[in-house]
Amino acid sequence: MAPVEGAWSQAEAEWFLERALVPVRLGCHGAGGLWMVSLWYRYHEGAVECATASDSDLATFLRRDDEVCFEISTNEPPYMGVRGNGSATIETDGGTAVLRDLLERYLGGTGSDLARWLLREEREEAVVRVDPARLYTWDFTPRMADLGEAPSVTRGEPTSPKYGQPGE
């Protein structure tokens, strides 16, 4: 894992990345300018891993230019997260296995119509592996403490690894 700056220690950042069930927002250089996509991810061996069709625009852009930035953050108060930059690689081996893992992580299984559509035989899946060069964390939990029980707690978003880990 890249060095961590900001509100959290490396262990706290890893705790968040392993538990957050929000998409990663991934920025790259696309056709004619910057490109932003939201993807399901998993934190694996110090990297952020996603899946995409091997012939997708994203895969094409990353093969041409591997420089990326990203953010993984809560969508509801108290706002917190991890952002960074680094490089991305596209790997064709293991794409379907990563996709299955992501379907388990975000949907709880592969029985839905969406999962069956994504896992269809004719689709060639690729792994997007983001190796961070720099990570920065923020956590507004203390300044948002007077908001009461935040909706993020009831919507499956993680609580702060620094200021409270209910049920952990």
Image: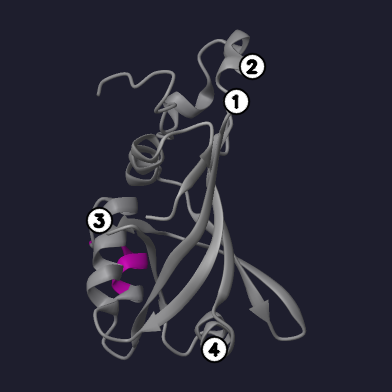
Q: In this orientation, does residue 71 appear?
A: no
| Mark 2 vs 3: CB contact within 8 A | no
What x and y, as percent, mark residue 89? 43, 79
Q: Residues within 10 Å of mark 3 (few under 14, many from 20)?
A: some
Q: Mark 4, mark 2: which one is toward the viewer? A: 2
**Does 11 sit left or right of 85 as displayed?**
left
**Mark 2 highlights which residue?**
143
Q: In this orientation, does residue 129 appear?
A: yes
**Residues in magenta?**
111-116
Marked residue nearer the N-terminal end (2 or 3): 3
Q: Mark 3, mark 4: which one is toward the viewer? A: 4
Marked residue nearer the N-terminal end (1 or 3): 3
Q: Residue at x 61, y 13 (%)?
A: 147
Q: Which amino acid type is marked by label 2? A: Arg
Marked residue nearer the N-terminal end (4 or 1): 4
Q: Secondary structure at mark 1?
A: loop
**Mark 4 highlights which residue?**
60
**Mark 3 highlights which residue?**
104
What x and y, as percent, mark residue 140? 60, 25
Where 91 falls versus 22 (above or below)?
below
In this orientation, which residue lies closer to the viewer: 102 or 29?
29
**Mark 1 highlights which residue?**
140
Where 148 falls versus 139 (above or below)?
above
Where 47 falls versus 117 (above or below)?
above
Q: Secondary structure at mark 2?
A: helix
Distance from the alpha carbon under mark 3 to that under mark 4:
26 Å
Distance from the alpha carbon under mark 2 to that under mark 3:
34 Å
Task: Tell me the quarter of the image containing the N terminus.
Answer: bottom left
Distance from the alpha carbon under mark 4 to that under mark 2:
42 Å
Asked where in the image residue 70 lies, by quadrant, the reply is: bottom right
